[in-house]
Image: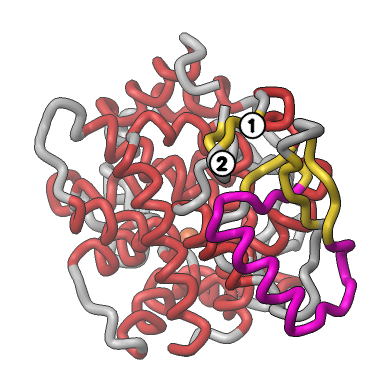
Amino acid sequence: MTKSAGSTIPAKIDEEYYQISEEILSSFPKFRPPVDLFRFNEEALTLVPIIRKGQRLTNEQVEEVHALCLAENLFVARSDHPIYSEHMVKQLDLVLQDSNLKESELADICMRALIMRYEAFAEQPVRPVFDPLYKDIMVFTEILWLDKHRIKLFMRRLSHDYSLGNHAFNSLIVGTWLLLRVMEGGELRRRDLDRAALAFFLQDIGMAKIPAFILNKPGSLKAEELEKVVLHPTVSYKIMQKLDLAFDELAQASLEHHERLDGTGYPQKSKGQQISRIGRIAAIADSFAAMITKRPYAEAKDPTQAAQELAADQKRYDGQLTGYLAAALLTGAVS
Ligand SMILES: [Fe+2]
Protein backbone atom coordinates (compact mmCIF):
# COMPACT_ATOMS: atom_id res chain seq x y z
CA MET A 1 0.00 0.00 0.00
CA THR A 2 1.19 3.49 -0.83
CA LYS A 3 0.22 6.35 1.41
CA SER A 4 -0.84 9.20 -0.77
CA ALA A 5 -2.64 12.52 -0.56
CA GLY A 6 -3.89 11.80 2.93
CA SER A 7 -5.52 8.54 1.88
CA THR A 8 -4.43 4.99 1.32
CA ILE A 9 -4.06 3.62 -2.17
CA PRO A 10 -5.48 0.10 -2.54
CA ALA A 11 -2.84 -2.59 -3.12
CA LYS A 12 -4.19 -3.52 -6.56
CA ILE A 13 -3.55 0.01 -7.79
CA ASP A 14 -0.11 -0.12 -6.25
CA GLU A 15 0.69 -3.13 -8.40
CA GLU A 16 -0.48 -1.54 -11.61
CA TYR A 17 0.84 2.00 -11.19
CA TYR A 18 3.96 3.75 -9.98
CA GLN A 19 3.78 6.90 -8.02
CA ILE A 20 5.92 9.55 -9.70
CA SER A 21 8.48 11.34 -7.58
CA GLU A 22 9.38 14.97 -8.09
CA GLU A 23 12.82 14.02 -9.45
CA ILE A 24 11.27 11.80 -12.09
CA LEU A 25 8.67 14.36 -13.05
CA SER A 26 11.31 17.06 -13.42
CA SER A 27 13.21 14.79 -15.80
CA PHE A 28 10.22 14.62 -18.19
CA PRO A 29 9.79 17.26 -20.90
CA LYS A 30 7.82 19.82 -18.91
CA PHE A 31 5.09 20.56 -21.45
CA ARG A 32 4.84 17.14 -23.07
CA PRO A 33 5.05 14.20 -20.64
CA PRO A 34 6.08 10.96 -22.40
CA VAL A 35 3.58 8.82 -20.43
CA ASP A 36 -0.08 8.94 -19.42
CA LEU A 37 -0.49 10.60 -16.04
CA PHE A 38 -3.10 9.64 -13.44
CA ARG A 39 -4.36 10.90 -10.12
CA PHE A 40 -6.13 9.08 -7.33
CA ASN A 41 -9.84 9.69 -6.99
CA GLU A 42 -10.73 9.21 -3.34
CA GLU A 43 -14.48 8.79 -3.83
CA ALA A 44 -14.16 6.15 -6.51
CA LEU A 45 -11.01 4.65 -4.95
CA THR A 46 -9.52 4.43 -8.37
CA LEU A 47 -6.99 6.23 -10.54
CA VAL A 48 -8.30 8.58 -13.17
CA PRO A 49 -6.36 9.75 -16.22
CA ILE A 50 -5.56 13.45 -16.24
CA ILE A 51 -3.00 13.81 -19.04
CA ARG A 52 -2.48 11.69 -22.14
CA LYS A 53 1.07 11.01 -23.29
CA GLY A 54 2.42 13.47 -25.80
CA GLN A 55 -0.35 15.95 -25.00
CA ARG A 56 0.79 19.58 -24.98
CA LEU A 57 0.17 21.03 -21.51
CA THR A 58 -0.88 24.56 -20.68
CA ASN A 59 0.98 26.47 -17.96
CA GLU A 60 -1.92 25.74 -15.61
CA GLN A 61 -1.73 22.03 -16.32
CA VAL A 62 2.01 22.03 -15.69
CA GLU A 63 1.35 23.59 -12.31
CA GLU A 64 -1.51 21.21 -11.56
CA VAL A 65 0.66 18.20 -12.39
CA HIS A 66 3.48 19.53 -10.23
CA ALA A 67 1.12 20.12 -7.31
CA LEU A 68 -0.29 16.59 -7.59
CA CYS A 69 3.23 15.23 -7.62
CA LEU A 70 4.15 17.16 -4.46
CA ALA A 71 0.98 15.79 -2.84
CA GLU A 72 2.16 12.26 -3.76
CA ASN A 73 -0.86 11.90 -5.97
CA LEU A 74 0.60 11.51 -9.44
CA PHE A 75 0.88 8.11 -11.09
CA VAL A 76 2.04 6.37 -14.23
CA ALA A 77 0.68 3.00 -15.38
CA ARG A 78 3.00 0.01 -15.23
CA SER A 79 1.85 -0.71 -18.79
CA ASP A 80 3.85 2.39 -19.73
CA HIS A 81 6.94 0.76 -18.27
CA PRO A 82 8.79 0.48 -21.62
CA ILE A 83 8.57 4.26 -22.15
CA TYR A 84 9.24 5.00 -18.53
CA SER A 85 12.29 2.73 -18.41
CA GLU A 86 13.58 4.08 -21.73
CA HIS A 87 13.53 7.42 -20.04
CA MET A 88 15.39 6.14 -16.99
CA VAL A 89 18.03 4.42 -19.13
CA LYS A 90 19.10 7.90 -20.17
CA GLN A 91 19.05 9.22 -16.64
CA LEU A 92 20.08 6.26 -14.57
CA ASP A 93 20.41 8.03 -11.22
CA LEU A 94 16.61 8.19 -11.19
CA VAL A 95 16.48 4.48 -10.36
CA LEU A 96 17.98 5.26 -6.97
CA GLN A 97 15.05 7.52 -6.15
CA ASP A 98 12.31 5.29 -7.41
CA SER A 99 11.11 2.90 -4.75
CA ASN A 100 8.37 1.58 -7.06
CA LEU A 101 10.75 -0.27 -9.33
CA LYS A 102 10.97 -4.00 -8.92
CA GLU A 103 14.49 -5.35 -8.46
CA SER A 104 14.37 -6.99 -11.88
CA GLU A 105 13.33 -3.69 -13.50
CA LEU A 106 16.13 -1.89 -11.71
CA ALA A 107 18.68 -4.38 -13.02
CA ASP A 108 17.28 -4.29 -16.58
CA ILE A 109 17.39 -0.50 -16.72
CA CYS A 110 20.89 -0.39 -15.26
CA MET A 111 22.15 -3.01 -17.73
CA ARG A 112 20.73 -1.15 -20.73
CA ALA A 113 22.15 2.17 -19.53
CA LEU A 114 25.63 0.76 -19.03
CA ILE A 115 25.75 -0.94 -22.43
CA MET A 116 24.49 2.23 -24.12
CA ARG A 117 27.13 4.35 -22.34
CA TYR A 118 29.88 1.90 -23.22
CA GLU A 119 28.98 1.79 -26.89
CA ALA A 120 28.93 5.57 -27.09
CA PHE A 121 32.32 5.76 -25.37
CA ALA A 122 33.81 3.03 -27.59
CA GLU A 123 32.81 5.13 -30.58
CA GLN A 124 34.12 8.37 -29.12
CA PRO A 125 36.52 7.88 -26.19
CA VAL A 126 36.53 11.50 -25.05
CA ARG A 127 35.77 13.20 -21.73
CA PRO A 128 32.20 14.44 -22.47
CA VAL A 129 31.18 10.87 -23.40
CA PHE A 130 33.11 9.38 -20.49
CA ASP A 131 31.49 11.55 -17.82
CA PRO A 132 27.96 10.08 -18.12
CA LEU A 133 29.49 6.57 -18.28
CA TYR A 134 31.36 7.24 -15.05
CA LYS A 135 28.21 8.59 -13.43
CA ASP A 136 26.28 5.45 -14.39
CA ILE A 137 29.01 3.15 -13.08
CA MET A 138 28.68 5.02 -9.79
CA VAL A 139 24.93 4.35 -9.84
CA PHE A 140 25.70 0.66 -10.44
CA THR A 141 28.09 0.54 -7.47
CA GLU A 142 25.58 2.43 -5.33
CA ILE A 143 22.92 -0.16 -6.19
CA LEU A 144 25.33 -2.86 -4.99
CA TRP A 145 26.52 -0.91 -2.00
CA LEU A 146 22.92 -0.70 -0.75
CA ASP A 147 22.63 -4.48 -1.11
CA LYS A 148 25.59 -6.55 -2.29
CA HIS A 149 23.36 -9.55 -3.03
CA ARG A 150 22.01 -7.61 -5.99
CA ILE A 151 25.07 -8.69 -7.95
CA LYS A 152 23.10 -11.93 -8.51
CA LEU A 153 20.43 -9.98 -10.39
CA PHE A 154 23.14 -8.88 -12.78
CA MET A 155 24.76 -12.31 -13.00
CA ARG A 156 21.41 -13.56 -14.30
CA ARG A 157 21.56 -10.96 -17.05
CA LEU A 158 24.90 -11.87 -18.62
CA SER A 159 24.61 -11.60 -22.37
CA HIS A 160 25.10 -14.54 -24.73
CA ASP A 161 25.25 -12.37 -27.86
CA TYR A 162 28.55 -10.73 -28.63
CA SER A 163 28.99 -7.00 -29.01
CA LEU A 164 31.62 -4.71 -27.50
CA GLY A 165 29.04 -3.33 -25.09
CA ASN A 166 27.71 -6.75 -24.06
CA HIS A 167 31.24 -8.03 -23.53
CA ALA A 168 32.11 -5.04 -21.35
CA PHE A 169 28.91 -5.55 -19.34
CA ASN A 170 29.67 -9.25 -18.84
CA SER A 171 33.24 -8.44 -17.77
CA LEU A 172 32.01 -5.78 -15.36
CA ILE A 173 29.50 -8.12 -13.75
CA VAL A 174 31.72 -11.20 -13.48
CA GLY A 175 34.68 -9.10 -12.30
CA THR A 176 32.57 -7.36 -9.67
CA TRP A 177 31.00 -10.67 -8.58
CA LEU A 178 34.48 -12.17 -8.09
CA LEU A 179 35.70 -9.12 -6.18
CA LEU A 180 32.69 -9.19 -3.86
CA ARG A 181 33.15 -12.95 -3.40
CA VAL A 182 36.85 -12.58 -2.53
CA MET A 183 36.09 -9.75 -0.13
CA GLU A 184 33.20 -11.57 1.56
CA GLY A 185 33.57 -11.13 5.30
CA GLY A 186 36.46 -8.73 4.74
CA GLU A 187 36.47 -4.98 4.54
CA LEU A 188 35.71 -3.72 1.08
CA ARG A 189 35.92 0.04 0.82
CA ARG A 190 33.45 1.84 -1.38
CA ARG A 191 36.25 3.56 -3.24
CA ASP A 192 37.84 0.21 -4.09
CA LEU A 193 34.54 -1.13 -5.42
CA ASP A 194 34.05 2.01 -7.55
CA ARG A 195 37.53 1.84 -9.00
CA ALA A 196 37.48 -1.89 -9.67
CA ALA A 197 34.06 -1.73 -11.34
CA LEU A 198 35.20 1.04 -13.67
CA ALA A 199 38.40 -0.91 -14.42
CA PHE A 200 36.57 -4.16 -15.29
CA PHE A 201 34.13 -2.24 -17.47
CA LEU A 202 36.80 -0.43 -19.46
CA GLN A 203 39.63 -3.00 -19.53
CA ASP A 204 38.90 -4.03 -23.12
CA ILE A 205 38.10 -0.59 -24.53
CA GLY A 206 41.24 -0.78 -26.73
CA MET A 207 39.38 -3.42 -28.79
CA ALA A 208 37.19 -0.61 -30.14
CA LYS A 209 40.22 0.57 -32.11
CA ILE A 210 40.62 -2.78 -33.87
CA PRO A 211 38.79 -3.04 -37.21
CA ALA A 212 35.64 -5.17 -37.01
CA PHE A 213 36.79 -7.46 -39.84
CA ILE A 214 39.70 -8.62 -37.64
CA LEU A 215 37.48 -9.13 -34.59
CA ASN A 216 34.92 -11.10 -36.58
CA LYS A 217 37.33 -13.14 -38.65
CA PRO A 218 36.42 -16.83 -38.42
CA GLY A 219 39.88 -18.20 -39.34
CA SER A 220 43.31 -17.56 -37.87
CA LEU A 221 44.75 -14.05 -37.99
CA LYS A 222 47.66 -12.85 -40.12
CA ALA A 223 50.78 -11.68 -38.27
CA GLU A 224 49.98 -7.98 -38.65
CA GLU A 225 46.36 -8.53 -37.54
CA LEU A 226 47.55 -10.43 -34.48
CA GLU A 227 49.94 -7.61 -33.68
CA LYS A 228 47.02 -5.18 -33.53
CA VAL A 229 45.07 -7.48 -31.21
CA VAL A 230 48.06 -7.97 -28.91
CA LEU A 231 48.38 -4.20 -28.54
CA HIS A 232 44.81 -3.66 -27.31
CA PRO A 233 45.53 -3.86 -23.54
CA THR A 234 48.08 -1.07 -23.97
CA VAL A 235 45.62 0.88 -26.11
CA SER A 236 42.98 0.52 -23.36
CA TYR A 237 45.43 1.94 -20.85
CA LYS A 238 46.42 4.81 -23.13
CA ILE A 239 42.78 5.80 -23.68
CA MET A 240 42.40 6.11 -19.91
CA GLN A 241 45.64 8.05 -19.53
CA LYS A 242 44.38 10.53 -22.10
CA LEU A 243 41.36 11.10 -19.89
CA ASP A 244 43.66 11.63 -16.89
CA LEU A 245 42.29 8.50 -15.30
CA ALA A 246 45.14 7.14 -13.27
CA PHE A 247 44.69 4.59 -10.55
CA ASP A 248 46.11 1.12 -10.00
CA GLU A 249 42.96 -0.86 -10.76
CA LEU A 250 42.61 0.66 -14.23
CA ALA A 251 46.23 -0.08 -15.11
CA GLN A 252 46.02 -3.61 -13.68
CA ALA A 253 42.76 -4.62 -15.34
CA SER A 254 43.60 -3.20 -18.76
CA LEU A 255 47.26 -4.22 -18.92
CA GLU A 256 46.91 -7.62 -17.22
CA HIS A 257 43.61 -9.08 -18.40
CA HIS A 258 45.43 -11.16 -21.04
CA GLU A 259 48.36 -12.13 -18.82
CA ARG A 260 48.32 -15.75 -17.65
CA LEU A 261 49.88 -17.26 -14.51
CA ASP A 262 52.24 -19.51 -16.51
CA GLY A 263 53.64 -16.60 -18.53
CA THR A 264 51.87 -17.51 -21.78
CA GLY A 265 49.79 -14.35 -21.89
CA TYR A 266 50.46 -10.88 -23.30
CA PRO A 267 51.64 -8.11 -23.56
CA GLN A 268 54.29 -8.50 -20.79
CA LYS A 269 54.24 -12.31 -20.44
CA SER A 270 54.03 -11.71 -16.68
CA LYS A 271 53.93 -14.75 -14.40
CA GLY A 272 52.36 -15.81 -11.10
CA GLN A 273 52.72 -13.18 -8.39
CA GLN A 274 53.73 -10.55 -10.95
CA ILE A 275 50.04 -10.41 -11.87
CA SER A 276 47.91 -8.41 -9.42
CA ARG A 277 44.69 -9.71 -7.88
CA ILE A 278 42.67 -7.25 -9.94
CA GLY A 279 44.55 -8.49 -13.03
CA ARG A 280 43.72 -12.12 -12.19
CA ILE A 281 40.05 -11.29 -11.67
CA ALA A 282 40.05 -9.27 -14.90
CA ALA A 283 41.51 -12.23 -16.81
CA ILE A 284 38.79 -14.61 -15.61
CA ALA A 285 36.04 -12.03 -16.16
CA ASP A 286 37.24 -11.38 -19.72
CA SER A 287 37.69 -15.05 -20.65
CA PHE A 288 34.40 -16.12 -19.09
CA ALA A 289 32.56 -13.19 -20.72
CA ALA A 290 33.92 -14.24 -24.11
CA MET A 291 33.29 -17.99 -23.66
CA ILE A 292 29.59 -17.58 -22.93
CA THR A 293 28.90 -15.46 -26.03
CA LYS A 294 28.53 -16.68 -29.60
CA ARG A 295 31.40 -15.63 -31.85
CA PRO A 296 32.08 -16.21 -35.56
CA TYR A 297 34.79 -18.69 -34.56
CA ALA A 298 33.10 -20.33 -31.55
CA GLU A 299 29.66 -21.27 -30.25
CA ALA A 300 28.49 -19.83 -26.93
CA LYS A 301 29.30 -22.14 -24.04
CA ASP A 302 26.99 -22.92 -21.22
CA PRO A 303 28.13 -20.70 -18.27
CA THR A 304 28.58 -23.64 -15.90
CA GLN A 305 30.68 -25.49 -18.46
CA ALA A 306 32.74 -22.36 -19.18
CA ALA A 307 33.41 -21.83 -15.47
CA GLN A 308 34.42 -25.48 -15.06
CA GLU A 309 36.82 -25.24 -18.00
CA LEU A 310 38.44 -22.19 -16.44
CA ALA A 311 38.63 -23.94 -13.06
CA ALA A 312 40.37 -26.88 -14.71
CA ASP A 313 42.99 -24.55 -16.20
CA GLN A 314 44.94 -23.76 -13.03
CA LYS A 315 48.19 -23.28 -14.90
CA ARG A 316 46.82 -20.11 -16.46
CA TYR A 317 44.01 -18.90 -14.20
CA ASP A 318 43.90 -18.35 -10.43
CA GLY A 319 42.37 -21.57 -9.10
CA GLN A 320 40.80 -20.03 -6.01
CA LEU A 321 38.92 -17.46 -8.09
CA THR A 322 37.82 -19.86 -10.83
CA GLY A 323 36.78 -22.30 -8.07
CA TYR A 324 34.44 -19.68 -6.57
CA LEU A 325 32.83 -19.05 -9.94
CA ALA A 326 32.43 -22.72 -10.86
CA ALA A 327 30.99 -23.58 -7.43
CA ALA A 328 28.48 -20.72 -7.55
CA LEU A 329 27.28 -21.72 -11.02
CA LEU A 330 27.17 -25.45 -10.22
CA THR A 331 25.07 -24.92 -7.10
CA GLY A 332 22.78 -22.47 -8.87
CA ALA A 333 23.76 -19.71 -6.44
CA VAL A 334 23.96 -17.16 -9.24
CA SER A 335 21.68 -18.57 -11.93
FE1 LIG B 1 41.04 -7.98 -24.11
In this view, the residue in front, 123 or 314, is 123
Residue at horizontal 85 percent and vertical 51 percent from the top: 49
Are the two marked residues, 2 and 1, in contact with CB atoms closer than 8 angstroms?
yes
Identity of the amino acid at label 2?
A: Ser
Assess disc 2: are there few (<14), some (14-19) or many (≥20) residues with their C-alpha within 10 Å of its C-alpha. some
Would you say residue 291 is visible in this rendering?
no
Estimate the x, y position of residue 245 in percent, counting from the top left: 28, 80
Estimate the x, y position of residue 155 in percent, counting from the top left: 52, 34
Residue at image mark 1? 9
Residue at horizontal 56 percent and vertical 41 percent from the top: 4
237 in magenta: no
Tag 2's secondary structure? strand
Q: Which residues are magenta?
A: 51-76
Q: Is residue 82 left or right of residue 75?
A: right
Identity of the amino acid at label 1?
A: Ile
Assess disc 1: are there few (<14), some (14-19) or many (≥20) residues with their C-alpha within 10 Å of its C-alpha. many
